[in-house]
Image (cartoon, rainbow, N blue to C red):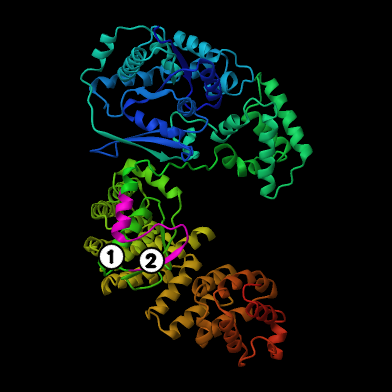
Amino acid sequence: MPASVAFFGIRHHGPGSARRLVEALDALAPRVVLIEGPADASDLLPLLADPDMVPPVALLTYAEDNPADASFFPFAHWSPEYQAARWAVNHGAALRFIDLPASDRLTPADDADELAASDAVTRDPIGALAAAAGYDDGESWWSDVIEANPAPGPVFAAVADAMTALRADRPLPAREAAREAHMRLEIARAVRESDSAIAVVCGAWHVPALAEKRPQAADRDLLKGRARTKVRATWAPWTAPRLARASGYGAGVVAPGWCAHLWDAGDRENRDSVWLARVARLLRDRGHFVSTASVIEAQRLGVALAALRGRPAAGFEELRDASIACLTFGERTVWNDIAAELLIGSAVGAIPAAVPLAPLLEDLQRQQKAARLKPEALERELAVDLRSDSGALRSTLLHRLAALDVPWGQLVDAGRSRGTFRENWRLCWLPEFAVRLVENLVHGATIAEAAAARLTAAMQDEADLGRLAALVRSAMLADLGAAVEIGIAALETRAALTSDCRMLLDALPPMADIVRYGEARAGAAAHLTALMPRIVVQAALALPYAARGLDAEAAAALRTSILAADGAIALAELGPEVTESWRQALHALLDDAATTRLVSGLAARLLYEAGAIAADPIADLLGRMLSPGTPFADAAGFFEGFFAGASARLIHDAALRGAVDGWLMGLDEADFVTSLPLFRRVFAGLDRSERRRLLDAVGNRGGSGGAGYRLTDAAAAHWPAHFAHLVDLLNNGARA
């Protein structure tokens, strides 16, 4: 007898579809199970039933000559195709994919796929059915009818009828027509080879076309001349967030966590209460009080909302609204604190050891072997000497992985030493790094190619000069010469076009690091040795104008940028002319009355530390800026700008200490108390011994800290509370 063929139109990631499908397979008991998927990857399909295969996982196919040309076919444990594959293996049924092979390439005729983009029904048939049923979106309609419906009825027959009506007289894109022709031929082959029941599991949209009787010769003609290429296929671990539609996955679902709950809960009547109990547990774990009575009320409200909205059962939207009302007392921010963990999840899949690896993972294993670095789960320290071949190889590998967002190694005390030939790393391998490498396959097939492509793309999209310079530094440390050249060219172009002072200043520290590391890396930073002085001069010209009339936040940000840029200029040793232009810009900040005092205070200190202003003139300047005639806010800003991060100078410099003492003595008590947070910030950098030495210097005593100090009668009369506050501040460090 000829084989009978049953078609099961499913949603690719739907727990309700998966449950109904398993029930239908149990009833049909087919000896052959055909699944929509790349036909040349059929040999990997039975691995889904391997006990060591832990979803979510993805079937990865990629072209051998261009691994960046890759495709992923994700599966969750609640995906119908996954359940169909497990059913077939467990029941001894033949199992294979029937869609166009992964080796099939796009052809010129496939340009007709653009037709689908203009056809709303072809693009979203579920949405069209939802609109016809009076729903605003296809997700809610499908959930009500299939996924969460406690009594869905003959689902597959109804879906097939609906799709038949939608497809009537509708043109089909060329690639879709080729896919369906290939699947029909594979079904026909299975019919010839089997005399028992055959189950076809495919997307609901394809059911009418696959069930239709068409001449096989016409289908073969449709597939003639299609381009092919050699491909490889493997399984790769996947993540729950990558199953979400928000990740950009076109076939994704809104809430993978909710879908997993629907599959695990099945058709049990307590499905809603189990979900709400999980919500309550997460809230309690974060320190929120949630009573059992509130959970009961939330369950009742969820059911009532579903009835008001005409839904057969409460969905995650109704239970979300009920949770916000009853469990978080209307505070949506509390709900948002758990929403990602609840609705998306953080599950990471695992694949059996026998599965062939993806190209980046294979390349990583080769690089690990060459560098003699073994991945370990426990942290360990690694010292790298860049002057040795093995040290340079290890450093390059770790920097390239960091560029791919795979921080297997993290630099310890990065940037604290002027030595350029040694790096200290802390290594710790985490399982999710394999997932990140698989995700980076879109950038290249090897660690070097992927890191270079990823950094290059980031450089081309980066508008901020400072972040662009940091990307160039990352490319240089990773020994990616082509990416470095592209980044330096982008730096030159954008530096010439920008007049933003802070952006120019923020570009200098990473550029100085590049110049410094040029001695220890294969790629010399000759271009930057010429570019960096130009940026310094541009920043110097813009600085006096950028420092005028700033509010507190903007002034603090500019102060941070100036401080970092000054250190970078000193580190890069750009020559006396460049250094002099920078110092002239700092002098201009002192001469301009419109300069924000926090910034001019920093400029004065930097010039003093560089020897550009002698001790006596700087004491006179500080005395003027802190004189009684200066507004309190201006004086306080200059004081903070000068001494924040450099308060230890007050221990050794009597002239500076005298100017500050005179200012403090002139403050009334209210202003002094108002300034205590400022003093706290300024003196926070002093350790215990430095605070004691400063008190010794202020009180003209030795070794006893602030204890036992006495004010002169004149000081006590003029400054009744100041000294006690200051002694307490210095004696207790951060406590004001």
**Earlier sequence position, callout 2 versus callout 1:** 1
Callouts 2 and 1 close, C-beta under 8 Å: no
Instruction: Provide the residue designation for mark 2.
Output: 565
Residue at 33% x, 51% y: name it.
364
Q: Nearer the viewer, residue 1 or 580?
A: 1
On the image, numbered disc 1 is attached to which residue?
390
Amino acid type, callout 2: Ala
Q: Position of residue 189 (x, y in %)?
A: 32, 15
Does residue 549 appear anywhere in the picture? no
- Image: magenta residue range: 363-384
Taking depth in this image into account, of 408 and 626 the one nearest to the observer is 408
User: Which mark, by number, is residue 69?
Assistant: none
Q: Horizontal placement of 592 versus 129: left or right?
A: left
Q: Residue farthest to the right?
A: 293
162 or 132: nearer the eye? 162
Q: Secondary structure at mark 1?
A: helix
Report how far apart the C-alphas of labels 2 and 1 lie in the structure: 34 Å
